[in-house]
Image: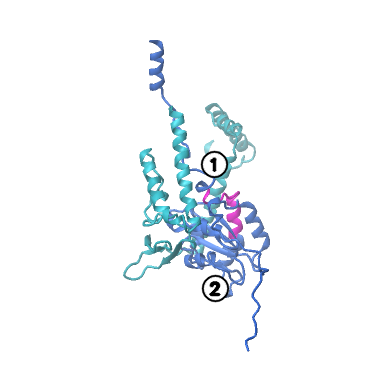
Amino acid sequence: MSSSLRAIEKKVALRKQVYKTVLGSPFVNEAHMWPRVQDQAVVLELLKGTVLNKCVHLQGVERGQWPLDVATDYNEIVKLLGAAGGPQELDAILFVCPRDSGIPPVLLQQVPLMCYTSRGTVTLVQLPQGSHKLLLAEPLYCKEGLLLVHCNDKLDGKFVAAVRDKTDPLRFPWLDGIAYQRTDLKLLKTTAPLKRKQK
Amino acid sequence: MNREQRERFRDTHLRFQYDLLHYLPRSSSTAPLAGLYLKKFYNATKRYQLQLPAQIVQADAKFCGQCGIVRVAHHNLLVSKQQGSSGQPSNRLLYTCRQCGREASFNLGEDPPLESPKTAESDSTKVSAQAGKVQKSAGSSAKERAKKRKQNSLSNLLSRKNAEQKNRTSGSGSSNILSLEDFMQQ
Protein backbone atom coordinates (compact mmCIF):
# COMPACT_ATOMS: atom_id res chain seq x y z
CA MET A 1 0.00 0.00 0.00
CA SER A 2 2.77 2.35 0.98
CA SER A 3 4.69 1.63 -2.19
CA SER A 4 1.68 2.37 -4.34
CA LEU A 5 1.10 5.62 -2.46
CA ARG A 6 4.68 6.58 -3.05
CA ALA A 7 4.26 5.79 -6.71
CA ILE A 8 1.22 8.05 -6.90
CA GLU A 9 3.09 10.79 -5.07
CA LYS A 10 5.92 10.49 -7.55
CA LYS A 11 3.49 10.80 -10.44
CA VAL A 12 1.71 13.80 -8.99
CA ALA A 13 4.89 15.52 -7.71
CA LEU A 14 5.46 18.93 -9.16
CA ARG A 15 8.33 19.14 -11.59
CA LYS A 16 10.29 22.30 -12.02
CA GLN A 17 10.19 23.85 -15.44
CA VAL A 18 13.46 23.85 -17.34
CA TYR A 19 14.40 24.85 -20.85
CA LYS A 20 16.63 22.47 -22.72
CA THR A 21 18.21 23.12 -26.07
CA VAL A 22 16.81 20.43 -28.28
CA LEU A 23 18.43 21.56 -31.50
CA GLY A 24 21.50 23.28 -30.06
CA SER A 25 24.27 21.22 -31.60
CA PRO A 26 27.84 22.50 -32.06
CA PHE A 27 27.77 21.29 -35.67
CA VAL A 28 25.02 23.67 -36.73
CA ASN A 29 25.84 26.24 -34.00
CA GLU A 30 22.60 28.07 -34.62
CA ALA A 31 22.56 29.58 -31.14
CA HIS A 32 25.63 31.64 -31.99
CA MET A 33 24.71 32.91 -35.43
CA TRP A 34 25.83 36.37 -34.39
CA PRO A 35 29.25 36.34 -32.75
CA ARG A 36 29.62 37.72 -29.24
CA VAL A 37 31.11 41.20 -28.96
CA GLN A 38 32.95 42.12 -25.77
CA ASP A 39 32.49 45.73 -24.64
CA GLN A 40 29.79 46.62 -27.14
CA ALA A 41 29.72 50.20 -25.86
CA VAL A 42 33.45 50.58 -26.55
CA VAL A 43 33.09 49.16 -30.06
CA LEU A 44 30.22 51.53 -30.77
CA GLU A 45 32.27 54.49 -29.53
CA LEU A 46 35.18 53.41 -31.72
CA LEU A 47 32.87 53.16 -34.72
CA LYS A 48 31.47 56.61 -34.02
CA GLY A 49 34.87 58.17 -33.55
CA THR A 50 36.56 56.57 -36.52
CA VAL A 51 33.83 56.22 -39.13
CA LEU A 52 30.48 57.83 -38.35
CA ASN A 53 31.74 61.23 -37.18
CA LYS A 54 33.97 61.48 -40.23
CA CYS A 55 31.11 60.65 -42.57
CA VAL A 56 28.89 63.36 -41.08
CA HIS A 57 31.23 65.98 -42.54
CA LEU A 58 31.15 64.40 -45.98
CA GLN A 59 27.67 65.46 -47.02
CA GLY A 60 27.58 66.40 -50.65
CA VAL A 61 30.92 64.71 -51.38
CA GLU A 62 30.87 61.85 -53.86
CA ARG A 63 31.36 58.37 -52.37
CA GLY A 64 34.46 57.81 -54.51
CA GLN A 65 36.24 60.79 -53.02
CA TRP A 66 35.64 59.83 -49.37
CA PRO A 67 38.67 59.20 -47.14
CA LEU A 68 37.10 55.81 -46.27
CA ASP A 69 35.87 52.94 -48.40
CA VAL A 70 32.42 51.93 -47.19
CA ALA A 71 29.47 50.03 -48.61
CA THR A 72 25.93 50.42 -47.33
CA ASP A 73 23.71 48.96 -50.05
CA TYR A 74 22.43 45.42 -49.40
CA ASN A 75 22.97 44.14 -52.94
CA GLU A 76 26.45 45.66 -53.09
CA ILE A 77 27.46 44.01 -49.81
CA VAL A 78 26.03 40.65 -50.92
CA LYS A 79 28.01 40.94 -54.15
CA LEU A 80 31.22 41.81 -52.30
CA LEU A 81 30.83 38.89 -49.90
CA GLY A 82 30.22 36.46 -52.72
CA ALA A 83 32.79 37.81 -55.17
CA ALA A 84 34.46 34.87 -56.87
CA GLY A 85 38.12 35.72 -57.32
CA GLY A 86 38.93 39.35 -57.80
CA PRO A 87 42.23 41.20 -57.99
CA GLN A 88 42.20 41.50 -54.20
CA GLU A 89 40.70 39.41 -51.43
CA LEU A 90 38.07 41.14 -49.35
CA ASP A 91 39.37 42.45 -46.04
CA ALA A 92 36.58 44.23 -44.22
CA ILE A 93 34.54 44.70 -41.09
CA LEU A 94 30.78 44.38 -41.39
CA PHE A 95 28.72 46.20 -38.76
CA VAL A 96 25.15 44.93 -38.46
CA CYS A 97 22.15 45.85 -36.30
CA PRO A 98 20.35 42.50 -35.93
CA ARG A 99 18.51 43.49 -32.75
CA ASP A 100 16.70 46.53 -34.09
CA SER A 101 13.01 46.11 -34.70
CA GLY A 102 12.92 48.03 -37.99
CA ILE A 103 14.94 45.41 -39.84
CA PRO A 104 13.18 42.19 -40.92
CA PRO A 105 15.09 39.11 -39.62
CA VAL A 106 14.84 37.38 -42.99
CA LEU A 107 16.95 40.14 -44.54
CA LEU A 108 19.88 39.41 -42.22
CA GLN A 109 19.40 35.63 -41.97
CA GLN A 110 22.03 34.83 -44.60
CA VAL A 111 24.55 37.51 -43.57
CA PRO A 112 26.56 35.41 -41.03
CA LEU A 113 26.74 32.53 -43.51
CA MET A 114 27.90 34.84 -46.29
CA CYS A 115 30.61 36.27 -44.04
CA TYR A 116 31.79 32.79 -43.11
CA THR A 117 31.93 31.52 -46.69
CA SER A 118 33.43 34.69 -48.17
CA ARG A 119 36.91 34.36 -49.57
CA GLY A 120 38.56 37.14 -47.64
CA THR A 121 38.73 38.14 -44.00
CA VAL A 122 35.39 39.54 -42.92
CA THR A 123 34.75 40.36 -39.29
CA LEU A 124 31.08 40.40 -38.40
CA VAL A 125 30.24 42.82 -35.61
CA GLN A 126 26.75 43.04 -34.15
CA LEU A 127 25.86 46.45 -32.78
CA PRO A 128 23.68 46.99 -29.69
CA GLN A 129 19.95 47.57 -29.91
CA GLY A 130 19.00 51.05 -31.05
CA SER A 131 22.16 51.67 -33.06
CA HIS A 132 20.27 51.50 -36.37
CA LYS A 133 19.29 55.15 -35.87
CA LEU A 134 22.95 56.09 -35.89
CA LEU A 135 23.49 54.40 -39.22
CA LEU A 136 20.42 56.08 -40.71
CA ALA A 137 22.00 59.52 -40.41
CA GLU A 138 23.07 61.40 -43.51
CA PRO A 139 25.07 60.78 -45.65
CA LEU A 140 25.52 57.04 -44.89
CA TYR A 141 21.82 56.14 -44.64
CA CYS A 142 22.21 52.40 -44.07
CA LYS A 143 18.58 51.39 -44.62
CA GLU A 144 19.19 47.72 -43.95
CA GLY A 145 21.39 48.30 -40.90
CA LEU A 146 24.50 47.05 -42.69
CA LEU A 147 27.75 48.99 -42.90
CA LEU A 148 30.78 47.39 -44.54
CA VAL A 149 34.07 49.17 -43.93
CA HIS A 150 37.03 48.12 -46.06
CA CYS A 151 40.21 47.59 -44.06
CA ASN A 152 42.78 49.28 -46.27
CA ASP A 153 45.37 52.04 -45.93
CA LYS A 154 42.63 54.63 -45.53
CA LEU A 155 41.38 53.10 -42.28
CA ASP A 156 43.17 53.37 -38.94
CA GLY A 157 44.94 50.09 -38.20
CA LYS A 158 44.45 50.48 -34.46
CA PHE A 159 40.68 50.68 -34.95
CA VAL A 160 40.69 47.48 -37.00
CA ALA A 161 42.84 45.65 -34.45
CA ALA A 162 40.71 46.81 -31.52
CA VAL A 163 37.43 45.79 -33.15
CA ARG A 164 38.76 42.41 -34.25
CA ASP A 165 40.17 41.80 -30.81
CA LYS A 166 36.81 42.38 -29.18
CA THR A 167 34.80 40.19 -31.56
CA ASP A 168 34.58 36.42 -31.40
CA PRO A 169 35.17 34.59 -34.70
CA LEU A 170 32.33 32.89 -36.58
CA ARG A 171 32.04 29.11 -36.27
CA PHE A 172 29.85 27.04 -38.56
CA PRO A 173 31.40 23.58 -38.90
CA TRP A 174 28.63 22.46 -41.26
CA LEU A 175 29.77 25.02 -43.80
CA ASP A 176 33.42 23.96 -43.77
CA GLY A 177 32.96 21.63 -46.70
CA ILE A 178 31.16 24.32 -48.64
CA ALA A 179 33.47 27.21 -47.87
CA TYR A 180 35.91 28.15 -50.54
CA GLN A 181 39.39 26.80 -49.98
CA ARG A 182 42.26 28.04 -52.02
CA THR A 183 44.40 25.29 -53.56
CA ASP A 184 48.12 25.72 -53.28
CA LEU A 185 48.65 23.64 -56.40
CA LYS A 186 49.65 25.70 -59.39
CA LEU A 187 51.50 23.32 -61.74
CA LEU A 188 50.77 19.63 -61.98
CA LYS A 189 53.64 17.37 -63.02
CA THR A 190 52.34 14.96 -65.66
CA THR A 191 53.15 13.56 -69.11
CA ALA A 192 51.82 14.26 -72.58
CA PRO A 193 52.25 12.28 -75.84
CA LEU A 194 54.97 13.45 -78.20
CA LYS A 195 53.65 14.85 -81.44
CA ARG A 196 55.30 13.46 -84.54
CA LYS A 197 55.77 15.65 -87.50
CA GLN A 198 53.59 14.59 -90.41
CA LYS A 199 55.17 14.51 -93.80
CA MET B 1 12.24 3.36 -21.35
CA ASN B 2 11.61 5.74 -18.48
CA ARG B 3 10.85 9.44 -18.91
CA GLU B 4 14.46 10.59 -18.77
CA GLN B 5 15.62 8.05 -21.30
CA ARG B 6 12.74 8.93 -23.57
CA GLU B 7 13.64 12.62 -23.47
CA ARG B 8 17.29 11.87 -24.12
CA PHE B 9 16.38 9.71 -27.09
CA ARG B 10 14.11 12.46 -28.45
CA ASP B 11 16.89 15.05 -28.16
CA THR B 12 19.51 12.95 -29.89
CA HIS B 13 17.06 11.81 -32.55
CA LEU B 14 16.00 15.35 -33.44
CA ARG B 15 19.53 16.73 -33.26
CA PHE B 16 20.78 14.00 -35.57
CA GLN B 17 18.06 14.73 -38.10
CA TYR B 18 18.66 18.47 -37.94
CA ASP B 19 22.43 18.01 -38.34
CA LEU B 20 21.79 15.74 -41.30
CA LEU B 21 19.75 18.46 -43.01
CA HIS B 22 22.78 20.73 -42.78
CA TYR B 23 25.11 18.05 -44.04
CA LEU B 24 23.16 17.50 -47.27
CA PRO B 25 24.11 20.62 -49.31
CA ARG B 26 27.78 19.59 -49.26
CA SER B 27 27.59 17.32 -52.29
CA SER B 28 25.39 17.30 -55.34
CA SER B 29 24.59 13.60 -54.87
CA THR B 30 22.94 14.05 -51.47
CA ALA B 31 21.27 17.41 -52.12
CA PRO B 32 18.20 15.95 -53.94
CA LEU B 33 17.35 13.99 -50.78
CA ALA B 34 16.93 17.20 -48.77
CA GLY B 35 13.16 17.34 -49.25
CA LEU B 36 12.68 13.83 -47.86
CA TYR B 37 14.87 14.47 -44.84
CA LEU B 38 13.17 17.80 -44.15
CA LYS B 39 9.76 16.13 -44.18
CA LYS B 40 11.07 13.45 -41.84
CA PHE B 41 12.38 16.10 -39.46
CA TYR B 42 9.10 18.01 -39.47
CA ASN B 43 7.15 14.79 -38.85
CA ALA B 44 9.42 13.96 -35.92
CA THR B 45 8.88 17.36 -34.31
CA LYS B 46 5.16 16.93 -34.81
CA ARG B 47 5.27 13.52 -33.17
CA TYR B 48 7.14 14.90 -30.18
CA GLN B 49 4.77 17.91 -30.07
CA LEU B 50 7.57 20.43 -30.26
CA GLN B 51 7.10 23.97 -31.44
CA LEU B 52 9.97 25.08 -33.65
CA PRO B 53 11.20 28.70 -33.71
CA ALA B 54 9.92 30.99 -36.47
CA GLN B 55 13.29 31.23 -38.20
CA ILE B 56 13.13 27.48 -38.98
CA VAL B 57 9.45 27.19 -39.75
CA GLN B 58 9.00 30.38 -41.79
CA ALA B 59 8.07 29.33 -45.31
CA ASP B 60 10.91 29.53 -47.84
CA ALA B 61 13.28 31.28 -45.41
CA LYS B 62 15.75 28.74 -44.04
CA PHE B 63 14.77 25.83 -46.26
CA CYS B 64 13.63 25.94 -49.87
CA GLY B 65 9.87 25.48 -50.11
CA GLN B 66 10.16 23.10 -53.07
CA CYS B 67 13.32 21.00 -52.76
CA GLY B 68 13.84 21.44 -49.00
CA ILE B 69 17.56 22.25 -49.17
CA VAL B 70 19.14 24.42 -46.46
CA ARG B 71 19.71 27.78 -48.03
CA VAL B 72 23.32 28.93 -48.23
CA ALA B 73 23.83 32.18 -50.09
CA HIS B 74 26.25 32.00 -53.04
CA HIS B 75 26.20 28.22 -52.87
CA ASN B 76 22.64 27.16 -53.61
CA LEU B 77 20.92 30.50 -53.30
CA LEU B 78 20.89 33.83 -55.12
CA VAL B 79 19.90 36.77 -52.95
CA SER B 80 18.83 40.17 -54.18
CA LYS B 81 16.88 43.07 -52.80
CA GLN B 82 14.41 44.83 -55.05
CA GLN B 83 13.61 48.46 -54.42
CA GLY B 84 9.98 49.46 -54.25
CA SER B 85 8.55 51.46 -57.11
CA SER B 86 5.79 54.05 -57.29
CA GLY B 87 3.17 51.35 -57.89
CA GLN B 88 4.49 49.06 -55.15
CA PRO B 89 6.32 51.17 -52.52
CA SER B 90 7.45 48.30 -50.28
CA ASN B 91 10.83 46.66 -50.89
CA ARG B 92 11.14 42.96 -51.52
CA LEU B 93 13.81 40.36 -50.89
CA LEU B 94 14.11 37.82 -53.65
CA TYR B 95 15.47 34.31 -53.05
CA THR B 96 16.22 32.11 -56.05
CA CYS B 97 17.10 28.49 -55.35
CA ARG B 98 19.92 27.24 -57.55
CA GLN B 99 18.92 23.65 -56.89
CA CYS B 100 15.34 23.75 -58.21
CA GLY B 101 14.94 27.29 -59.55
CA ARG B 102 12.11 28.23 -57.19
CA GLU B 103 11.75 31.93 -56.51
CA ALA B 104 10.51 33.25 -53.19
CA SER B 105 9.96 36.87 -52.28
CA PHE B 106 9.60 38.47 -48.87
CA ASN B 107 7.96 41.78 -48.12
CA LEU B 108 10.41 44.10 -46.35
CA GLY B 109 8.23 47.14 -45.97
CA GLU B 110 9.15 50.67 -46.92
CA ASP B 111 12.47 52.41 -46.38
CA PRO B 112 12.96 53.99 -42.93
CA PRO B 113 13.06 57.80 -42.77
CA LEU B 114 16.38 59.60 -43.00
CA GLU B 115 17.78 60.73 -39.63
CA SER B 116 19.43 64.08 -39.24
CA PRO B 117 22.98 63.85 -37.79
CA LYS B 118 21.98 65.87 -34.69
CA THR B 119 19.19 63.52 -33.58
CA ALA B 120 21.38 60.54 -34.35
CA GLU B 121 24.09 62.01 -32.11
CA SER B 122 21.66 62.45 -29.21
CA ASP B 123 20.41 58.89 -29.71
CA SER B 124 23.94 57.56 -29.79
CA THR B 125 24.59 58.64 -26.21
CA LYS B 126 21.47 56.75 -25.15
CA VAL B 127 22.56 53.61 -27.00
CA SER B 128 26.08 53.63 -25.56
CA ALA B 129 24.71 54.27 -22.07
CA GLN B 130 22.29 51.38 -22.50
CA ALA B 131 25.03 49.06 -23.71
CA GLY B 132 27.21 50.04 -20.75
CA LYS B 133 24.35 49.52 -18.33
CA VAL B 134 23.70 46.01 -19.57
CA GLN B 135 27.33 45.06 -19.15
CA LYS B 136 27.46 46.63 -15.69
CA SER B 137 24.45 44.67 -14.46
CA ALA B 138 25.80 41.48 -15.95
CA GLY B 139 29.15 41.97 -14.23
CA SER B 140 27.81 42.81 -10.74
CA SER B 141 28.39 40.03 -8.26
CA ALA B 142 25.98 38.71 -5.62
CA LYS B 143 27.99 40.49 -2.91
CA GLU B 144 27.56 43.85 -4.61
CA ARG B 145 23.86 43.29 -5.07
CA ALA B 146 23.44 42.39 -1.39
CA LYS B 147 25.35 45.54 -0.43
CA LYS B 148 23.05 47.61 -2.60
CA ARG B 149 19.98 45.99 -1.05
CA LYS B 150 21.28 46.81 2.42
CA GLN B 151 21.89 50.40 1.43
CA ASN B 152 18.35 50.73 0.22
CA SER B 153 16.75 49.36 3.37
CA LEU B 154 14.28 51.61 5.22
CA SER B 155 16.42 52.29 8.29
CA ASN B 156 19.37 53.23 6.11
CA LEU B 157 17.25 55.57 4.02
CA LEU B 158 15.90 57.27 7.17
CA SER B 159 19.33 57.71 8.69
CA ARG B 160 20.62 59.11 5.40
CA LYS B 161 17.73 61.56 5.28
CA ASN B 162 18.37 62.66 8.86
CA ALA B 163 22.05 63.19 8.13
CA GLU B 164 21.16 65.28 5.08
CA GLN B 165 18.81 67.43 7.12
CA LYS B 166 21.45 67.94 9.77
CA ASN B 167 23.96 68.96 7.13
CA ARG B 168 21.50 71.40 5.64
CA THR B 169 20.76 73.05 8.95
CA SER B 170 24.41 73.24 9.91
CA GLY B 171 25.29 74.50 6.42
CA SER B 172 22.64 77.22 6.51
CA GLY B 173 23.86 78.24 9.96
CA SER B 174 27.48 78.63 8.99
CA SER B 175 27.70 79.77 5.38
CA ASN B 176 24.41 81.50 4.64
CA ILE B 177 24.08 83.64 7.72
CA LEU B 178 23.23 86.73 5.81
CA SER B 179 20.79 85.19 3.28
CA LEU B 180 17.48 86.98 2.80
CA GLU B 181 15.49 83.75 2.97
CA ASP B 182 16.74 82.90 6.44
CA PHE B 183 16.05 86.43 7.60
CA MET B 184 12.46 86.26 6.31
CA GLN B 185 11.91 82.88 7.97
CA GLN B 186 13.11 84.21 11.31
- The stretch in magenta equals A32-48
* Drawn side of residue A5 relative to residue B130, left or right: left
Percent x, y of residue B72? 48, 58
The amino acid marked with disc number 1 is Glu
Of all residues, the one furthest to the bottom in this rendering is A199
Q: Residues within 10 Å of mark 2 (few under 14, many from 20)?
A: some
Residue B91 appears in view: yes
Q: Residue B181 — which label?
A: 1
Q: Quadrant of the C terminus of chain B?
A: top right
Q: Which chain is blue?
A: A
Residue A24 x, y percent position in the rendering: 50, 43
Estimate the x, y position of residue B172 in percent, counting from the top left: 60, 38
Crowding at label 1, few (<14), some or many (≥20) Cα neighbours within 10 Å? Answer: few
In front here: B80 or B6?
B6
Question: Do circles 1 and 2 both sit on a common chain?
Answer: no
Subunit ID for the residue under disc 2 = A
Q: Colour of chain B?
A: cyan
Looking at this view, name the residue that lies furthest to the front.
A199
Q: The disc labelled 2 sits on which kind of residue?
A: Arg
